[in-house]
Image: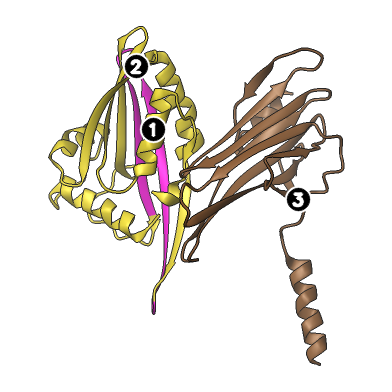
Amino acid sequence: MTKHTIWTGLLVSVALTGCVTHPQTAEEFRRAVPGALTAKTEAFEVNRPFRDVAATFRKKAPECLDVTIKTTSRANMSYQVIVTEYKPTVVVTRERAELHVQQHHKSGVVRVSKEPAGGYYLLVADAYPVDQNKTRVQMFAPSMGHGVLIRAVKGWATGENLGCPDMTKT
Amino acid sequence: MRLSLLLLAVGLLAGCSSIRPYPNNLDRNLQIRTETGSGSIFSSTRASVGIYRVDGQCRIEYEGTIDLDKPVVLVGLPSDRLSYLIFSFFSSSLFGHARTSMSQETLLRTRTSYSYQIDVSYRNSIYNVVVREHYPRKRGSREIDLRRLDACREIVARR
């Protein structure tokens, strides 16, 4: 994880909040992303049954995203340690499967506004059944940085790559 | 005096190094297939697996590490005992500025006369560890879910 990513995270936060408050729930995050400068939403369809996509989210999210990343950086006269905890949540109903990813900076980053339990929302991916063999996925994610995380979640949705994102490279 | 200090330093470095090779002197019941690639000519990735013994109280004891520097590595794990495997991926840039590591862990109980295969990959910052158990005396296998160390008590209680 680079300083660039951390700054992007903060920018996303500020852009989403208008410097007032952060989204406190996944639903607030979904509503905030379309109007945010440093976040985007995208939708795509995959040729997989909804239950398979939901099962993949359920299996891979805890396996891959329940991680703590420690980043140490040294500049000329400074030394910085940032510890970031990621928390995945998967909620599956008959209508949709939701994957939420939250990040909490345990140390090294100043919180700019109230943080929801589990950390600031970083990504939300919603999967909806289209027909027996097709699923529509809508993602709400940062538009700068975290490309590895976004690629991994897309891989889980399509079933083409079930690997975990190296969160040190986000 | 200088020689004594040098010998002391060498001795300390040798004795205190926490990483040691896994003895790998049991019948080989595990095949690890590894594929790594950073996706950039300016960086490289290597992988290794740390092997731990797990006792009935879920305490772990380090047994050694195997570098996964060949496409296929054969490993002997004790049968009918729980082992704890930590797969680590180390990335470094050509210019030496950034070094990172990421790991994936799993508990594995190897059964007598079964064989195991683990596919390990790291490509374009996406890593994967897939464990399969092959049945003895017949074709076929099943995928085994990765289980973290905190699942140990549940696994031990089930037996």
Q: Residue at x 39, y 78 (%)?
A: A76
Please name the color used to draw chain A: yellow
Where the N terminus of chain B falls, by quadrant? bottom right
Residue under label 3: B64
Labels 2 and 3 positioned on one and the same chain = no
Q: Is residue A103 magenta?
A: yes
Q: Which residue type carries mark 3?
A: Gly
The subunit carrying tag 1 is A
Question: Which label was assigned to residue A153?
Answer: 1
Q: Residue at x 68, y 28 (%)?
A: B155
Colour convention of the picture = by chain
Residue under label 2: A93
Residue B98, percent across and down? 47, 62
Contact? badges 3 and 1 (CB < 8 Å): no
Which image quadrant for residue B109? top right
- Identify the secondary structure beneath mark 2: loop
Which image quadrant for residue A98? top left
Q: Residues within 10 Å of mark 1 (few under 14, many from 20)?
A: many
Residue A5, percent across and down? 32, 54
Residue A167 horizontal side relative to residue A112, left or right = right
Mark 3 to mark 1 CA distance (whole Å): 34 Å
Q: Is residue B94 magenta?
A: no
> Magenta region: which residues?
A76-105
Mark 2 to mark 1 CA distance (whole Å): 19 Å
**Mostly what secondary structure, the magenta segment?**
strand
Of the pair A166 and A81, the residue shown nearer to us:
A166
Q: Is residue B149 visible?
A: no
Contact? badges 2 and 1 (CB < 8 Å): no
Please name the color used to draw chain B: brown
Q: Which residue type carries mark 2?
A: Thr
Residue A146, percent across and down? 34, 45
